[in-house]
Image (cartoon, grey):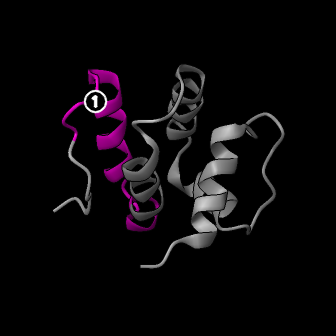
Amino acid sequence: MTGTKRSSEGLDAHRRKLLFRSWHRGLREMDLILGTFADAEIGSLTGEEIDQYERLLDIPDAEFLPLVTGERPVPADIDCAVLQKILASRRTMTF
């Protein structure tokens, strides 16, 4: 079971791939954070936001999790609109 509550129906192949990657990170914590975000937002992200999200997904979990949880500051080179959306959604998540 992936945890996803969203069907990939209606998504183009690139968005389906990103949705899958969001739920299959390696660390369950990151699966829940990014998977839940992708379930809610993947269909409405702009082309530029999709590019930003894909770059964020390339960051290893061990580096990304402390940024998302606030344990480490976000480096300027990866701070972007999508990361800010992820951080905002993280603050409102309930598991």
Q: Decide if residue 25 is on the left or right side of residue 80.
A: left
Q: Quadrant of residue 52?
A: top right
State the SS at label 1: loop
- Image quarter of the N terminus: bottom left
* Whole-percent x, y for residue 30 in the image: 46, 60
* 11 lies above or below 40: above
- Image quarter of the C terminus: bottom left
Along the viewing direction, whichever of 44 and 33 lies nearer the viewer: 44
* Whole-percent x, y for residue 3 in the image: 25, 63
Please give the residue where the numbered disc 1 appears in the rendered image: 11
* Whole-percent x, y for residue 90 in the image: 58, 65
The outermost residue toward the bottom is: 95
Is the residue marked by circle 1 packed among few (<14), some (14-19), or many (20+) residues within 10 Å? few
Along the viewing direction, whichever of 1 and 28 lies nearer the viewer: 1
Q: Quadrant of residue 10?
A: top left
Q: Quadrant of residue 35?
A: bottom left
Three-letter code, disc 1: Leu
Magenta-colored span:
8-31
Q: Decide if residue 17 is on the left or right side of residue 34.
A: left
